Amino acid sequence: MEFKLKSISKAGIPEAISKVELYRSLNEPEEAESICRDILAVEPENQLALRLLGLAITDQFCGDASDRSREVENLFERLVERYERLYYTGLLHERRAKAQMRVGRSPHTLAPLFGEAMRCFAEAETIRPPGNDDAILRWNRCARLLQSHPGFVEERESEAFDAFDSSPI
């Protein structure tokens, strides 16, 4: 059976956004994703809905092939501000790496994801808005995670981790 989806009103978008944030905080990312899709059906380039949809999808990452990372990458590429494109793409890579880490992927397979996340955060840091240290906070989290995880500590001598030894640009 197929149902025709109903459209929300443009006037209802602010309230819908607040519901997305509520559902994400309640760890109900599927509901948040559905509402974001309703918003984007009415306003396809709504920047907040694009960001929140990407985050709601990454909230569902489980570390396997079903993760929709390419879809999220496409959403974040539609962000108008360069800082936001970099920062949220960094979050995408960080969340992919963490999801794969949770299911036991080996550190050498995760290093490129963490490396790309940290590259995005370092680049975002150079163009961040005044007073916005989010990219620094995320870079530091990745660095601490890599320093504290036994598998990454053991591989620190390898050339794959030379990039993590330098401070952000």
Image: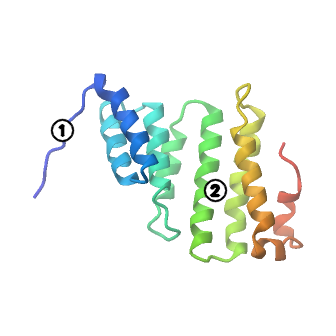
Among all residues in the image, which is located at the extreme top?
A: 11
Residue 163 position (above or below residue 19): below
At 68% from the left and 68% from the top, the residue drawn is 110
Left or right of 167 in this view: 18: left
At 49% from the left and 50% from the top, the residue drawn is 72
Residue 160 position (above or below residue 81): below
Report the amino acid beneath label 1: Lys
Task: Name the image quarter holding residue 132.
Answer: top right
Left or right of 87 in this view: 133: right
Among all residues in the image, which is located at the extreme front?
A: 26
Q: Position of residue 52 (x, y in %)?
A: 46, 41
Mark 2 vs 1, N-terminal side = 1
At 76% from the left and 64% from the top, the residue drawn is 146
Q: Position of residue 164 (x, y in %)?
A: 83, 58
**Which residue is tagged 1?**
6
**Which residue is tagged 2?**
94
| Coloring basis for residues | rainbow
Q: Which numbered dot is residue 79? A: none
Secondary element at tag 1: loop
